Amino acid sequence: MRDVGDPPAEAGSGFFAADDLSFEGAMHPALSLLVDYADAPLAIRSRQTGELEPLVTRQLIAHFEASFSILDRVRFGASLPLAVVTQGRASGLDNLAYAPSSGFAPGDLRVSADVRVVGRAHSAFTRASGLRLYAPTGSPDAFMSDGRARAALHLAAAG
């Protein structure tokens, strides 16, 4: 499962990992496709040797994103990750076998809303707050979801 703390920035952001707060316009749409690669993103610790055994050895994920801004201070967004390649090997823990599925697998859908509460687009200092909701649309077999809905509040500042 991808870590909730590591989603890519919203479509239209000037950065890949951190959102910028310069969203503006009466109706400003943005689309993006981001691809990330992880080497050994998921491992379990062997009880016999104490060593980490990679369960997922390689993973390539495409993030399809869209956003739009309104009223010069509000942004709505959506992101759907799709595992394009997942490679790994079967492993066991506590008499349970784990094996990643291969091939395409969806992740959890993220929808979000952000409101800039201080400053204007491209100001010397801005602050925003927002909410991200995650729907359990992902595949637990491909370790792209834990099957639970979740929410995350966030505060951001830029200058």
Image (cartoon, grey):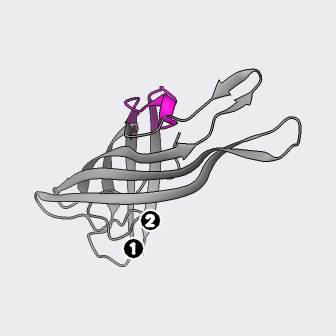
Q: Is residue 19 above or below residue 75?
A: below
- Amino acid found under the numbered disc labelled 1: Phe
Q: Are marks 1 and 2 in contact (CB under 8 Å)?
A: yes
Question: Badge 1 is on which residue?
Answer: 125
In the rendered structure, which disc, 1 or 2, sits on the residue that comes first in sequence?
Answer: 1
**Residue 154 place in picture, x, y as percent:** 46, 49
Q: Is residue 6 above or below residue 50?
A: below
- The residue closer to the viewer here, 34 or 110, is 34
- The residue closer to the viewer here, 50 or 66, is 50
Magenta-drawn segment:
133-151
Q: Looking at the rendering, which quadrant does residue 18 occupy?
A: bottom left
Secondary structure at badge 2 equals: strand
Q: Residue at x 28, y 50 (%)?
A: 64
Q: Residue furthest top?
A: 95
Q: Residues within 10 Å of mark 2 (few under 14, many from 20)?
A: some
Q: Residue at x 86, y 43 (%)?
A: 50
Quadrant including the C terminus: bottom left
Q: Is residue 23 left or right of residue 153?
A: left
Separation of residues labelled 1 and 2 (CA atoms): 7 Å
Secondary structure at badge 1 equals: loop
- Amino acid found under the numbered disc labelled 2: Ala
Q: Is residue 3 visible to us here? A: no
Q: Looking at the rendering, which quadrant does residue 22 occupy?
A: bottom left
Q: Is residue 146 visible to us here? A: yes
Q: Number of marks in the image?
A: 2
Asked if residue 99 is among those painted magenta in the image, a careful observer would answer no
Q: Is residue 152 left or right of residue 98?
A: left
Q: Which mark is residue 148?
A: none
Q: Looking at the rendering, which quadrant does residue 17 occupy?
A: bottom left
Q: Residue at x 70, y 22 (%)?
A: 96
**Residue 38 place in picture, x, y as percent:** 53, 56
Q: Which mark is residue 157?
A: 2
